[in-house]
Image (cartoon, grey):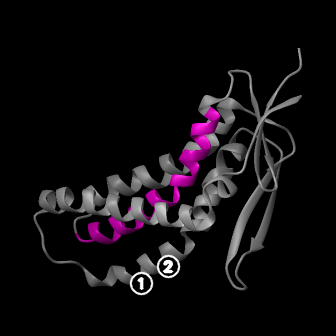
């Protein structure tokens, strides 16, 4: 296999810039979604019992997001190694490494899974649950901000050649091509 391109999104854009862009996308998505959904529901009051589940959900959101990245690999029975590390002393983070290379389609499934399994049901739930739509929308828009990094990954995967393979490395990912 030959390395077609080696990509480290954090190194390319910068950790602080990624955080700020994700934050801006999350806030803008909330601003753009809150007004139409609140007009649809026609209510101005909130059920205040939803604040504690919201805080717990936002604290668990990065772990849930990482698990949703891993879920398609478990479904298609790819051999993976899951590592639980903590960037902070008390907060766990999931990482995964595949023992084999992922095809372009498998990489697209991994990148899109959090959006399909968290963001889209969250948007649907904000339409269905009238009493808690504000909290559900805050949770969903926070996740939309987090998925910005996944979409940067997907942009690189989509631009890769058709028969490319993706390999996770410690500080990013490599796009590999088979030798002729």
Graded by Cα atoms within 10 Å as few (under 14), some (14 to 19) or many (20 or more), the crowding at tag 1 reads few
For the N terminus, the image quarter is top right
Where, by quadrant of the figure, is residue 51 drawn?
bottom left
Location of residue 171 in the rendering, given as x and y in whole percent from the top left corner: 78, 56
The reply to whether the C-beta atoms of the residues labelled 2 and 1 are less than 8 Å apart is yes
Q: Which residues are magenta?
A: 131-157
**Element marked by disc 2:** helix
Q: Is residue 26 above or below residue 155?
A: below
* Mark 1, residue position: 52
Magenta-drawn stretch contains 148: yes
**Element marked by disc 1:** helix
Location of residue 62 in the rendering, given as x and y in whole percent from the top left corner: 58, 66
Graded by Cα atoms within 10 Å as few (under 14), some (14 to 19) or many (20 or more), the crowding at tag 2 reads few
* Residue at image coords 61%, 30%: 159
Magenta-drawn stretch contains 149: yes
Taking depth in this image into account, of 125 and 27 the one nearest to the observer is 27
> Distance from label 2 to label 1 (Cα)?
6 Å
Which residue extends farthest top? Answer: 180
In the displayed structure, does residue 46 sit left or right of residue 9?
A: left
Q: Is residue 141 above or below residue 104?
A: below
Where, by quadrant of the figure, is residue 164 drawn?
top right
Which residue extends farthest left? Answer: 42
* Mark 2, residue position: 56
Location of residue 58 in the rendering, given as x and y in whole percent from the top left corner: 49, 73
For the C terminus, the image quarter is top right
What is the chief secondary structure element of the magenta stretch? helix
Location of residue 112 in the rendering, given as x and y in whole percent from the top left corner: 55, 43
In the displayed structure, does residue 139 sit left or right of residue 156?
A: left
Count the marks.
2
């Amino acid at each position: 296999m030959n390395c077609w391109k080696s990509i480290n999104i954090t190194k390319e854009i910068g950790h602080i810039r990624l955080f700020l862009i994700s934050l801006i996308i999350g806030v803008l998505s909330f601003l753009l979604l809150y007004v139409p959904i609140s007009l649809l529901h026609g209510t101005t009051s909130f059920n205040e019992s939803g604040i504690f589940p919201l805080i717990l959900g936002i604290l668990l959101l990065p772990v849930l997001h990482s698990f949703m990245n891993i879920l398609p690999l478990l479904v298609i029975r790819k051999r993976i190694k899951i590592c639980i590390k903590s960037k902070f002393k008390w907060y766990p983070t999931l990482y995964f490494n595949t023992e084999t290379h992922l095809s372009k389609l498998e990489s697209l499934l991994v990148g899109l899974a959090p959006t399909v399994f968290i963001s889209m049901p969250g948007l649907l739930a904000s339409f269905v649950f009238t009493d808690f739509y504000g909290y559900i929308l805050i949770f969903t828009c926070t996740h939309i901000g987090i998925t910005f990094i996944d979409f940067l990954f997907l942009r690189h995967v989509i631009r890769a050649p058709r028969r490319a393979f993706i390999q996770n490395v410690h500080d990013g990912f490599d796009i590999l091509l088979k030798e002729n």
